[in-house]
Amino acid sequence: MSRVYEASCGVAWSETGYIFATRNDRPVEPRNVYRSFTRVAAGAGVRVIRLHDARHGCATLLTAAGVAPRVIMEMLGHSQISITMDVYTHVVHDTQREAISHMDQLLKRRRPTV
């Protein structure tokens, strides 16, 4: 963590190897993470889901937004792009409609005019 962060937040950073750590540099208990997640979701009026399902949602939304699959793969920490694309991403109906619209435009260009 940068010195700028330490100065602005008044927090001394120590490297633990954990992505999320408590103030005592211990790993965060999964049940506490989920408890916080459900509290934030409920407060935002969002349906509570399994935390792991949020990874699938993240991959799907990033794909629909046009983010490169390789970037998504690295964000999720997968070793193979096939895991990201075959298991974690799901087709969004708007994306299907957009694909059909593109196909329609391509076919219209190729129709002979009478």
Image (cartoon, rainbow, N blue to C red):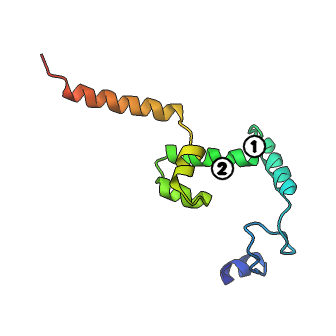
Q: Nearer the viewer, mark 2 or mark 1?
A: 2
Mark 1 falls on what kind of element?
Answer: helix
Please tell me in which quadrant of the rendered image residue 45 appears. top right
The residue at the point 81 percent across, 46 percent down is 38
Residue under label 2, please give it.
Answer: 55
Location of residue 54 in the rendering, given as x and y in whole percent from the top left corner: 68, 47
Give the side of residue 105 with respect to residue 112, left or right: right
Please tell me in which quadrant of the rendered image residue 8 appears. bottom right
Mark 1 is on which residue type? Ala
Residue under label 1, please give it.
Answer: 44
The residue at the point 77 percent across, 81 percent down is 14
Query: How packed is label 2: few (under 14 Cα within 10 Å), some, or many (20 or more)?
Result: some
Location of residue 97 in the rendering, given as x and y in whole percent from the top left corner: 45, 29
Mark positioned earlier in the residue sequence (2 or 1): 1
Location of residue 1 in the rendering, given as x and y in whole percent from the top left corner: 68, 78
Outermost residue, left direction?
A: 114
Mark 2 falls on what kind of element?
Answer: helix
- Between the residue at mark 2 and the residue at mark 1, the CA separation in whole angstroms equals 18 Å
Q: Which mark is residue 63?
A: none
